[in-house]
Amino acid sequence: MPRKKLLLLGGSRFLRPAIESAHRHGYHVITCDNIPGNFAHQIADESYNVSIIDKDAVLKLASSLNVQGILSFATDPGVVTAAYVAERLGLPTSPYDSVCVLQDKALFRNYLRRNDFCTPQFFVVSASDGEMPEISFPAIVKPVDLAGSKGVAKVENMDELAPAVASACEMSRSGRSIVEEYLEQVGYSSGSDSFAVDGEFVILSFDDQHFNKAAASQFVPVAHTWPSTMPELYQTKLRIELQRLISLLNMQTTLFNIEARVAQKDGDAYIMEVSPRAGGNRLAEMLHLASGVDVIDIAVQAAVGDSFDKPTPVTDFELIGEMILHSNTQGQFQSIVIDPIVEKENVAELDLWVNPGDKVQPFMTASDAIGTLVLRFDSAQQQIDLMSSYNEWIKVTVL
């Protein structure tokens, strides 16, 4: 029988586990984006130089290739395009209109407000707008249609607001930005992946996001740990509200990258972002390690319409962590040095993406990462101790 064809949008190294899974099932993997030298194209069966934000160009490509599935795995710019193409070709997907709601921060915030979800104060603005509405400070400014903390700025007053809005609108593909009140968090924020089958979560996970105050950006996580230390009261509320959200939107079988936090101002739990894709930074792989369920394998099978064994819902997660390796300065990478004891007892995997002499950038967005480090812990206390002191046991040298 002819091999099923799966079109993956994007070409980053984060596509590797999806490609490997597809190959295990005997699928023919096609990748496309507008950067022919990208990593994933080298391990796909074939690749095409087509921009993944050009919906009609990707539709034409997918139709001409007669693909059985399309997926934007860990690739935020292609999520809307994948749903658009799949819906028009009758391939497995969640509703295109619902995906658009989740992928546009302005549409998403308005949807949450209309449906009585807990949401921060906000307004949407374009570069051509005049006087801006009032908002509490500090505030966060974001392009409405970018991910990975691109174009995000925290502002303290009206004088800082206009330049931040102009910068965010310039980076936005649609020329719009959203201004939100900044919700100072209680404890750690969460930014984990989760998985739903036929519109019902079977794995709804929360993690602890860790940030490096010395990094060039304060908004890009440098580490994730599971399970979350968020009090169960708030996790329970978020589970109920997240399920209500995807049910309202009629979402189907998909991976979700979900950000949430408990706000200091009112002690309530807030859904910050929900994207129908695997998160960057290998988060779906980490979810597999934490839950024991190969969610990537299931997502790939679902994308081409194949049957799969529905996993038993998971509520308990292994003690694991992931460091996002990075540099705080620009220069040439030299080495990574890990404390020998930590390396022997806790490091499960080091995935380094640069070689000595390669140029590296300050850690401003997720694309500036230079690798990942997977950790396992013997106890919750060991996890806390190591993650609170990582600058003491791991050093990245850049000249």
Image (cartoon, grey):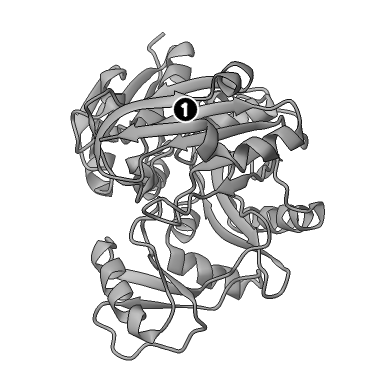
Residue 75, image x, y percentages: 38, 41
Drawn side of residue 237 relative to residue 101, left or right: right
Q: How many marks?
A: 1
Q: Position of residue 357 (x, y in %)?
A: 22, 26
Q: Nearer the viewer, residue 54 or 152?
A: 152
Q: Which of the two residues, 351 or 141, is positioned nearer the viewer here?
A: 351
Q: In the rendered image, is residue 396 in sight?
A: yes
Image check: 274 left or right of 236?
Answer: left
Quarter in which the N terminus is drawn: top left
Q: Is residue 366 above or below residue 67?
A: below
Q: Which residue is mark 1?
A: 304
**Residue drawn 31% across the image and 67% down it:** 168
- The residue sitting at the top extreme is 1
Residue under the image location 44 percent in, 69 percent down: 106
Residue 95 in percent (x, y) is at 49, 51
Q: Is residue 302 visible?
A: no
In the image as oriented, which residue stretches furthest toward the right?
A: 233
Residue type at mark 1 is Val
Circle 1 Cα neighbour tier, 10 Å, few/some/many (<14 / 14–19 / ≥20):
many
Identity of the residue drawn at 81% across and 57% down: 233
Q: Quadrant of residue 165?
A: bottom left
- Tell me where residue 130 appears, x and y as whole percent: 28, 89
Residue 399 placement: quadrant: top left
Residue 153's quadrant in the figure? bottom left
Relative height, residue 46 to residue 153 (above, below) = above
Of 8 and 88, the residue lying toward us? 8
- Taking 247 as reference, is 129 above or below it? below
Q: Secondary structure at mark 1?
A: loop
Q: Nearer the viewer, residue 366 or 312?
A: 366
